[in-house]
Image (tube, rainbow, N blue to C red):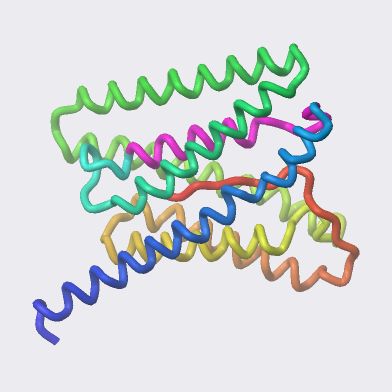
Amino acid sequence: MSDSVLNPVWTTCKDAAGIAGNIFAFGLFVSPIPTYRRIIRNRSTEQFSGLPYIYALMNCLICMWYGTPLISADNLLVVTVNSFGSVFQLAYIILFIIYAERKIKIRMSASLLAVLGVFAIIVVGSLQIHARMIRWVTVGSLTVVSLISMFASPLFVINLVIRTKSVEFMPFYLSLSTFLMSTSFFLYGVLNFDAFVYVPNGVGTILGIIQLALYFHYKKKPLHESKEPLIVSQA
């Protein structure tokens, strides 16, 4: 097959993988809505933690910055998914602050300001690096660290499932969506020849397979909805 035919097909496959990743990510972004309906209804954050949304916002912002033309080439679908993710996480954090107790409200507000401050430092600092390759590698490395840190969090859930022999805190559709999203962006990164995308999402894909395997192994146990769904983003 000639390059003139192969290149459009390659680009189409890459874009299809990225679009699929955006769609699966949207399912993850809306997954906390039932939790927030309860928070709004009871006008209290109860025992829920707001930290996962803080971490998710930081991750989305870093990955969004990496996807911009100022850092990497041809990564528009990375920008879109993480832009949506940033908006969702910011909305969740604001709602959490509104309904939290005063002590937690102050702590969450400080955490939000810290995240925005760190992101501003990353943006300004990376723009001071005039060599485009070094800028790409620097921000890309931060993206990999951020994503793998997010993907590592299910390890605690996996350990809990193995210890309790129950999938109570590992909802099936959340695990499935995470796996499909990670796989989609793994393929997107491979087709885009971008190791900063396919390496962390490859790790996410493997962890997703492990979660699904554990779910089907222990699904005989009674299921209950997890109180704190894990929200991840993709680069």
Magenta: main secondary structure equals helix
Q: Residue at x 35, y 68 (%)?
A: 16
Q: Is residue 46 left or right of residue 228?
A: right
* Residue 59 locus on image (x, y percent): 48, 38
- Name which quarter of the figure residue 170 lies in: bottom right
Q: Is residue 174 left or right of residue 127?
A: right
Q: Is residue 63 magenta?
A: yes
Q: Is residue 87 left or right of residue 32?
A: left
* Residue 10 locus on image (x, y percent): 24, 73
Q: Residue at x 69, y 47 (%)?
A: 229
Camera-side residue of 109 and 115: 109
Residue numbers of the magenta segment:
44-65
* Residue 112 locus on image (x, y percent): 55, 22
Q: Is residue 54 left or right of residue 195?
A: right
Camera-side residue of 15 and 137: 15
Residue farthest toward the front in the current orientation of the protein: 41
Q: Residue at x 51, y 17 (%)?
A: 113
- Name which quarter of the figure residue 45 lies in: top right
Residue farthest toward the right in the current orientation of the protein: 222
- Name which quarter of the figure residue 129 lies in: top left
In the rendered image of this protein, does residue 112 appear above or below residue 194? above
Q: Is residue 210 magenta?
A: no
Q: Residue at x 39, y 37 (%)?
A: 142
In the rendered image of this protein, does residue 99 appear above or below residue 68? above
In the rendered image of this protein, does residue 57 appear above or below residue 182? above
Q: Quadrant of the N terminus?
A: bottom left
